[in-house]
Amino acid sequence: MGSRVETFEQIRRDRDREGLSIRALAERHGVHRRAVRQALASPVPSPRKRPEGRPAPKLGAYRELIDEWLIADRDAPRKQRHTAHRVWERLGEEHGAEVSERAVRRWVAHRRRELGEALEGMVPLVHDPGVEAEVDWGEAVVILRGVPTKVFVFHMRACHSGGAFVMAFPRETQQAFLEAHAAAFDWFGGVFETVRYDNLKAAVTKILKGRRRVESDRFVALRSHYLFASSFCEPGEQGAHEKGGVEGEVGRYRRRHFVPLPEVASIAELNVLIAAGCISDLNRTIIGRAQTVGEALSGEMALLRALPAEPFDAREQSTPRVDAKSLVTVRQNRYSVPVALVGRRVLVKIGAREIEVFSEHELVAVHERLQGRYGVAGKLDHYLELLRRKPGALRASLPLRQERERGSWPSCFDELWSSIEARYGASEAARQMVDVLLLARELTPARVELAVRGALAAGATDGRAVAVLARRSERAEPATIELEERLAAIGGPEPTLTDYDQLLGGTVRR
């Protein structure tokens, strides 16, 4: 069956060609005679009338109660007020009301309009290129080392092009906020004139009347370094529409790139995936625009303020003393450093994601920053000199357990360890394993692992055999070098055919 417009057309054609009566036309087309009269009067069907004021007798007894809840909501936080669905649930759970959710929704919407709670209109805006960006935080869940984990996601969105920089952090801290800004400006290749915020704690220490803010010193230092202006929205939900672009971007990016949940081994690996998502999003086209996001952003980047000559260092600094266990305490967590530094003070640069330790201006340790308190992060390499003198401590050491948990301890090492122990005893096996680990520092862990596998395959269960195989592979010339490349490396005169030509001519001297 066609549409009502097509039915009206056929009725009008049959009347014009055959002169059929209204009754005959109604029987032929299976409609009421009233519909035939409507078709003959106009080729376009009249719109259906929407029922107004339809009684809802089951709801009538609860209308006053609903009004009480809606009026009480005026004093409740905006995010904890009744939705129409929640009103319907409470009516059923607390009062046993058998009413339809649709009827409740209509009544709640009607009463909210009467109470002056209608949605506020917004004015469409246009943004000049290179002028303004918006910043906000979002949340997402990822599978981190096999465990569902909440991460906090920083967004900076260019208002003109819609290009967005995204970066994840384990916590939403001021340090993460500052580091993300520096990374975002590097990604955009310049600095916007103005960056718009809501009332982020990382930037604002106190909210004054209207749009005035008392800003944190570290945020002021960031702003001074890059020389951009900051703009803050109205407090609360009423200010959310003032940076609606990035508000929508937070949800769009989460739906597009965090579904299904990413499975990663670290926050660094997650940020590699996120960066790829930012690049792929440059190919999308925002509804109502002719250019892709990437095309618009390429023109906008040329208008940004140039980056400062020196990058902004958002890290904090600390100078703790290395304790007897070769650990330094930073923000109530402890991190290992080489044992040669025990008792000395070191410089620690504290980032949102990493801890870097310096001694005499030399980088001596890098750790992923621990979250929470009283955690310990150890690396086995930091203790090898001590374990060489005390090899018996290797098996029960915390750094070895953490290497296993991180997946940095190959299973073939345990196989070699067991074989040496069965042959020479526990103490000698531990000592030889420490030598193997020191060899990995000298060469590379991958080369030593390959040598261990080779020794096991050959039945040479001995640390010295591993050292011989590892160093032999280091000296071996790569087989992939072609003959021409080898000859070119040797050098020598270019080959000629002069002697051969003289031979053919009989002019060669004997």
Image (spheres, rainbow, N blue to C red):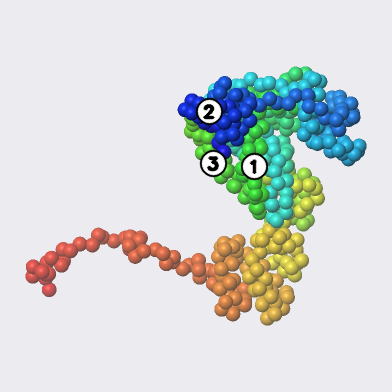
Please report whichever mark, 1 or 3, sits nearer to the chain's N-terminal start. Answer: 1
How far is mark 1 from mark 2, CA to CA? 59 Å
Q: State the mark number for residue 20.
A: 2
Residue 160 spot, x, y in % from top left: 56, 27
Which numbered disc, 1 or 2, marks the residue that appears first in the sequence? 2
- Counting residues from the start of the chain, the first of labels 2 and 3 encountered is 2
Q: Answer yes or no: is residue 70 visible.
A: yes
Residue under circle 1? 255
Pointer 1 with pointer 3, Cβ within 8 A: no
Q: Secondary structure at mark 3?
A: helix
> Label 1 neighbourhood size at 10 Å, few (<14), some (14-19), many (20+)?
few
The crowding category of the residue bearing disc 2, from other C-alpha atoms within 10 Å (few below 14, some 14 to 19, many at least 20), is some
481 or 154, which is in the foreground? 154
Viewer-proximal residue, 247 or 372? Answer: 247
Q: Closer to the camera: disc 1 or disc 2?
A: 2
Give the secondary structure at mark 1. helix
Q: Residue at x 85, y 27 (%)?
A: 70
**Left of 75 or right of it: where is 241?**
left
Q: Quadrant of residue 147?
A: bottom right
Q: Secondary structure at mark 2?
A: loop
Image vertical order of residue 335 relative to residue 1, above or below: below
- 278 or 249: nearer the eye? 249
Work out how far the residue at label 2 is from the one at label 3, CA to CA, in angstroms. Answer: 67 Å
Q: Is residue 472 left or right of residue 240?
A: left
Residue type at the position of mark 2:
Leu
Residue with the mark numbered 3:
279
Residue 349: x percent and y percent?
68, 43
Rendered location of residue 81, percent (x, y): 82, 31
